[in-house]
């Protein structure tokens, strides 16, 4: 895809309602959990990023309302690493909504694991076959990278 085609796609994505990307992210998270392609927590995600950035679809960083300086620094470092290595990063509005998504659609075994899960950083690996939502989220993130734009807001995940 050329730079011009990416700009045109970016213009198309601006015309879509802001909730569309949020719904796509929610669907990607549900599909990824069902296919066991999700990793949780800063340390586990960083470990995967150091070893295999090629397999990463997107890193999701929830907005931190809490004034946790250590977490903000970790998020900043993760974002910088991802940009340097061309890994897509997406900021979302709330870790609680992500937790709800995982606990409401999880199997019993996954629920037991997710109660102790750290949702401060979520890494979604590439699927074997990309769905429309996977492609939409990937294109959305890539348009910001290629266009030189940095989204200042967060994607709102529907409850």
Image (spheres, helix red, strand yellow):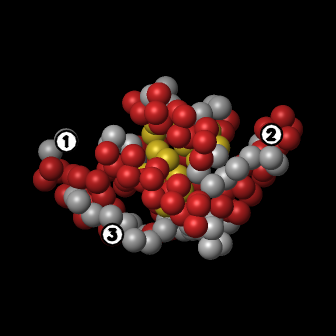
How far apart are the two marked residues, 1 and 2, measured between alpha carbons? 40 Å
| Residue 65 vertical placement versus 137 (above, below) | below
Residue denoted by label 3: 15
Residue at 59% in and 33% down: 37
Q: Residue lying at the far front in this picture: please name it.
A: 70
How far apart are the two marked residues, 1 and 3, measured between alpha carbons? 20 Å
Asked if the residue at tag 3 contacts the one at tag 1, i.e. Cβ–Cβ closer than 8 Å, the answer is no
Residue denoted by label 1: 1
Residue at 63% in and 31% down: 35
Placement of the N terminus among the 4 image quadrants: top left
Mark 1 or 3, nearer chain start: 1
Placement of the C terminus among the 4 image quadrants: bottom right
How far apart are the two marked residues, 2 and 3, measured between alpha carbons? 39 Å
Mark 1, secondary structure of its residue: loop
Is residue 76 shown left or right of residue 95? left
Residue 147 lies in what quarter of the image? bottom left
Residue denoted by label 2: 113
Asked if the residue at tag 3 contacts the one at tag 2, i.e. Cβ–Cβ closer than 8 Å, the answer is no
Mark 3, secondary structure of its residue: helix
Mark 2 or 3, nearer chain start: 3
């Amino acid at each position: 895809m050329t730079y011009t085609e990416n700009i045109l796609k970016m213009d198309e994505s601006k015309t879509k309602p802001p909730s569309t990307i949020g719904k796509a992210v929610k669907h990607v998270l549900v599909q990824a959990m069902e296919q066991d392609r999700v990793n949780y927590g800063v340390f586990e995600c960083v470990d995967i990023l150091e070893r295999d950035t090629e397999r990463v679809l997107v890193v999701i960083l929830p907005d931190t309302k809490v004034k946790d300086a250590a977490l903000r620094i970790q998020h900043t470092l993760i974002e910088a690493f991802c940009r340097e290595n061309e890994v897509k990063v997406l900021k979302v509005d709330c870790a609680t909504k992500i937790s709800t998504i995982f606990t409401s659609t999880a199997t019993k075994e996954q629920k037991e694991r997710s109660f102790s899960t750290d949702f401060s950083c979520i890494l979604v690996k590439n699927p074997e076959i990309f769905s429309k939502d996977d492609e939409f989220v990937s294109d959305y993130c890539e348009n910001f990278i290629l266009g030189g734009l940095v989204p200042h807001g967060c994607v709102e995940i529907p409850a």
